[in-house]
Image (cartoon, rainbow, N blue to C red):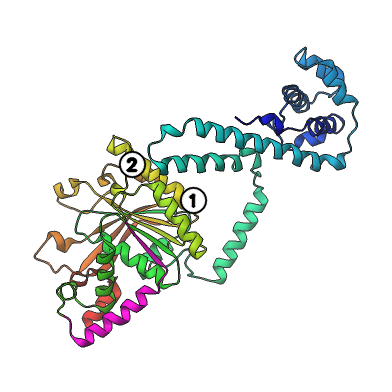
Amino acid sequence: MIDISKYSNYEAETNILSIFFDNKEFLDDTEIKRTDFYFDEHQKVFMAMQHLYHNHTAISLATLKETLGTSVSIQTLSEITSNFSSTATFSTYKKILIDHAMRRRIVILTQGLLTRMDEYNEIDVLLDKVENAFLSVRRDVSDITLPDMQDIVLETYNNILKDIENPGQLKGISTGFQDIDLYIGGLQKKTLYYIGARPSMGKTALLSQICLNVAKQGKVVVFFSLEMSEEKIIRRYISQETVIERDKIDLGLINQDELKKITDVSQQLSNLPLVIIENATINTNQMRNIIKKVKKKYGRVDLIAIDYLQYIQDQHKDRRIAVEENSRALKTMCKDFDTPVVCLAQLSRATEMRKDQRPILSDLKEAGGIEADADVVAFLYREGYYDKSIQDCLAELIIAKQRDGRLGTIKLGWIGECTLFVDYKKLEQNRKE
């Protein structure tokens, strides 16, 4: 066990308190708090000074004695009140005080983690606990600067002026689909998006296309595929980009012209900043570790995509609670990494029981918390999948929730043989031609 008393400085603590005694206004410094003082008597004197100051009572030897009673010795009070320390030394002593306090916290955290190490069976869970523990030292509320309303309004006003100077410019990264971008303003930082659909609607195809479109813009994308293999995703990309039917590619029924297209597209795909992680048993802690590695390699991460929520692993026995905890972890992830997170979600069979089978928010499977966590919830629906009497070439992306935008339905073209979505206007144009 490490003796934390070595991380203390009696002289610095005494001098800080002496400055407070002679210069009451220094007690407005919100960065210093009680636990920054190691010695118990110094903590009590500091709290007494704050109490007197905030109650507009004079701070003197007499008022301190009355407030503290016998909890602090006369010798300690005399040492503080009779000592003179220049205000010019305040920042120096403050740095020493906080530095030692931080070191003590690190030692205490480390020792606590060591004693509880055997409680965590999964190494990734343990690593996450360690990381969060040390982040808590940095994220102490005392380090937070209170926002100034004038600064916030001025910054917002300047951003509005920039929007006026660049009308129609997306706030986020383009999805590659014009109508989707117009509805949601592109994929925006610190924003959690859910795309829900019943099986075979094409939700994986849509998400993988968005990832490819974003990567083509030179953006770094991490795509967690918990259901489909890396090779199947690449085969799908090749089919989409060459517009060669997927069945022909899989069966090897390719002529020389088509082979050249496949070769060219394969070279283009290999140079994209798109990282595909195929893992059916991954949890959110492991995801975070991978994202950090990608960020270290490329210097940034611009989009995180997950296929899909209900496949993310969790140790909780209650499936509903596990899914909701994972959803909350994704919300934290998009904030911590300052990126948009787009995640697919499976829907319940309730849609099949209705005459109108278009999904609604209550159809989100095993996850009532999704609606609360999500900034945007969209549902993918193809009427032609259910009604075989009509041509299955049209899809709807239903925006059912959007914190900062409108709700409605976006039309998309669907080319089933290539598992490809296109802008509806492009589909209409091709039909005319």
Q: Measure how far apart labels 2 and 1 are at the Cα level.
A: 21 Å
Q: Which residue, given by chain and number where applicable, does mark 1 sit on?
A: 335
Q: Residues within 10 Å of mark 1 (few under 14, many from 20)?
A: some
As helix, strand or loop, the secondary structure at mark 2 comes to loop
Give above or below for 157 relative to 12.
below
What residue is rendered at 42% in x and 55% in y?
290
The quadrant in which the C terminus is found is: bottom left
The answer to which of 382 and 11 lies nearer the viewer is 11
The quadrant in which the N terminus is found is: top right
Relative to 132, 200 lies left or right = left
Q: Residue 314 bears which disc, if any?
A: 2
Q: Residue at the far left: name it.
A: 389
Q: Amino acid at mark 2?
A: Asp
What residue is rendered at 44% in x and 54% in y?
191
Q: Residue at the far front: name it.
A: 1
**Range of the magenta residues?**
254-278
Disc nearer the start of the sequence (2/1)? 2
